[in-house]
Structure formats: structure tokens, C-alpha cells
Image: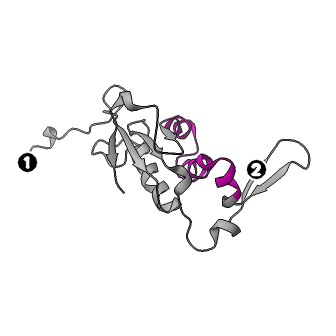
Amino acid sequence: MDTLSYKTVSANKGTANKEWIVVDAKDAIVGRLASQIAARIRGKHKPNFTPHADCGDNVIVINAEKIRFTGRKMTEKVYVRHTGYPGGQRFATPRIMLEKTPERVLEHAIRGMLPKNRLGRRLFTNLYVYTGETHPHAAQQPKEIKF
């Protein structure tokens, strides 16, 4: 066997073939959907996955307001944020978040599953979450994927 015939292929910005996909979040469980979307954004489903490069797909999520939680997470899970001012700690449950900004629930879950560095912040820009059936990315001709 000729060992010189095998080449290690690393993807970079020029060689990564990025695609656009649409995911319908209707009746999907938040964590399970988020982990599959995070893997798509990262590019782990591709044979030329490179950990230090943005080689994943651009993901469009529709119907973000129709996601589900299992168990009692809808009322007992707590999202904590801080305004930056003294005494500015704010708390919200998923029920409150889904009423005000339903996109943020899914964005928060997916962001937590991406790397916590420059690459993770860059990868997060490949995610587009929308409420309702429509999205403004029809020109990219995205493929619909069912998880």
C-alpha cells in the first residue's frame, strides 16, 4: 500500500462548499433540534470537516414560535441575563421568552452548543431564525431538511 497516495484535506474559506438549508421547527424539541442544527452549522456532517474553519452550512429556521420543551422546563427553566448596571440581573422563563421574542429561545440553545471563541461567534452568523412560515432568503434556493 502506497501511503503517499493519501492526502489530508483541510477545508478553508475557498474550498468549503457551503449550502443553504431550511429547517421547520414546528413541534420540535428545543435541545434535540438545537444539537442537530449546531452540528450542521459547524460542518460536522461533511467528510472534509475541519475544526478550525467555517465549513458548515447556512441554516434558516422557520416556525420558531412552535417549538416544544419536555417535562416542566417551560415554567421551571430560567434564563438569566444582566443589564450591566448594579442590581441589573434579570430572569425569564421559556414561556415569557416565547411570548416576547420566540427566536431567542432557539438562538440561545444553539449558541451554547457552538465553540466559545472567535470561530463560534463567526459560525453563529450562519444561523437565521424566523417566526412564521416565510423567510427573506428565497434567492439562495435553500433545501428543506427534516430532522
* Residue name at image x 43 percent, y 41 percent: 59
Q: Are marks 1 and 2 in contact (CB under 8 Å)?
A: no
Q: Main secondary structure of the magenta part?
A: helix
Q: Amino acid at mark 1?
A: Met
Position of residue 16 measured from the top left corner of the image (x, y, whole percent): 33, 32
* Residue name at image x 53 percent, y 58 percent: 67
Residue 89 magenta-highlighted: no
**131 displayed left or right of 139:** right
Front one among 4 and 66: 66
Q: Amino acid at mark 2?
A: Arg
| Residue density around tag 2, few if under 14, some if 14–19, many if 20 or more, within 10 Å | few
Q: Look at the image and give the residue range highlighted in magenta.
A: 96-125
| Residue labelled with disc 2 | 81
| Residue labelled with disc 1 | 1
The CA span between labels 1 and 2 is: 57 Å
- Please report whichever mark, 1 or 2, sits nearer to the chain's N-terminal start: 1
Position of residue 54 measured from the top left corner of the image (x, y, whole percent): 42, 35
| SS of the residue under disc 1 | loop
Position of residue 114 measured from the top left corner of the image (x, y, whole percent): 52, 47
Instruction: Answer with the quarter of the image where residue 5 lies.
Output: top left
* Residue name at image x 36 percent, y 41 percent: 21
**Residue 41 vertical placement versus 138 (above, below):** below
| Residue density around tag 1, few if under 14, some if 14–19, many if 20 or more, within 10 Å | few
| SS of the residue under disc 2 | strand
Position of residue 36 measured from the top left corner of the image (x, y, whole percent): 42, 55
* Residue name at image x 30 percent, y 33 percent: 17
**147 displayed left or right of 103:** left
Question: In which quadrant of the rendered image does the C terminus lie?
Answer: bottom left
